[in-house]
Image: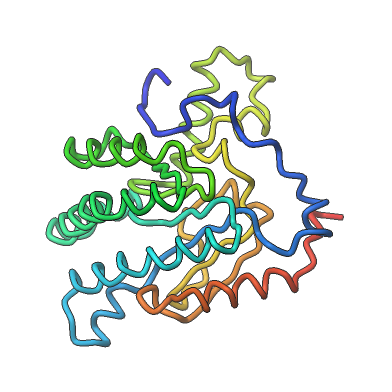
Amino acid sequence: MTSVEVNRPADLAVAAEPHNVEAAADTDPLPRHVAIVMDGNRRWAKMHGLSEAEGHSAGVDAIRPIVEHAADRGIEALSIYAFSRENWTRSDEEVGTLFALLEAAIRRETPDLVRQGVRVQILGRLHELPETTRASIAQAIAATAGGRRLTLNVAFNYSGRSEIVDAVQQAVADGLAPAEITEQAIGDRLYTADVAPLDLLIRTGGEMRISNFLIWQAAYAELYFTDTLWPDFEPATLDAAITEFARRSRRFGR
């Protein structure tokens, strides 16, 4: 891309095979790709008489068991919404806390992610992040590159609309004529181009919207909303969402 530096898979030639969604709907009740909008940290903190920073810290702690459980269940990709581009409007103190928690979590969790065979990818505009954050992210991506059990997509400084803009700009930069900018051409240039299509999108915290998260990918995803606040989200909560997913009939317009 010539105008915007973004984080995307380095080699789209090794992207996963296209997901046959119709066949999967009939034969495979397990979602290959699950995404979670991790909402409710601040409300959880208020309910427990804690600071917002402590709520965000509890939210970070809740990620590890979900990653482990997703890998154990055989889910191929887990995408989590950690920081949106809209989150920059929050206070400098809260933004600073979120960045510090991310960097600390990366340093602490990377060795265990390597052991588990989890590959880390960051979805979002990395060039807008502080240099120290970019360095920590680069180290985690490099260290976990060989992971094959699960791809963990961490959406940080992410916007679904920006992702689509970035994909279209990349198509133009690649020299595609207007008629060549198809859905396939855009899909091949999304941040998630090398993982299975999104099957299940979960939002915690009781809100019923997807908040600009994976809006292209969610076109035919199943949506699951739970009142559980993110710090209280447990493997059993994920299992409940997967069970509900398996009950649904995915017709894809048929």
Q: Is residue 197 left or right of residue 110?
A: right
* Vertical comparison of 35 with 52: above or below: above
Residue 224 is situated, as x and y percent measured from the top left of the image, at 59, 70
* Vertical comparison of 7 with 71: above or below: above
Of residues 90 and 80, the one drawn nearer to the viewer in this rendering: 80
Q: Residue at x 53, y 19 (%)?
A: 172
Q: Is residue 26 left or right of residue 167?
A: right
Residue 211 is situated, as x and y percent measured from the top left of the image, at 46, 59
- Pick out the residue farthest to the right: 254
Q: Name the quadrant of the N terminus.
A: top left
* Vertical comparison of 199 with 217: above or below: below
- Picture mark count: 0
| Residue 13 can be seen in this image | yes
Q: Name the quadrant of the C terminus.
A: bottom right
Q: Name the quadrant containing residue 176.
A: top right
Residue 236 is situated, as x and y percent measured from the top left of the image, at 52, 78
* Vertical comparison of 19 with 56: above or below: above
Residue 177 is situated, as x and y percent measured from the top left of the image, at 63, 15
Q: Residue at x 75, y 70 (%)?
A: 248
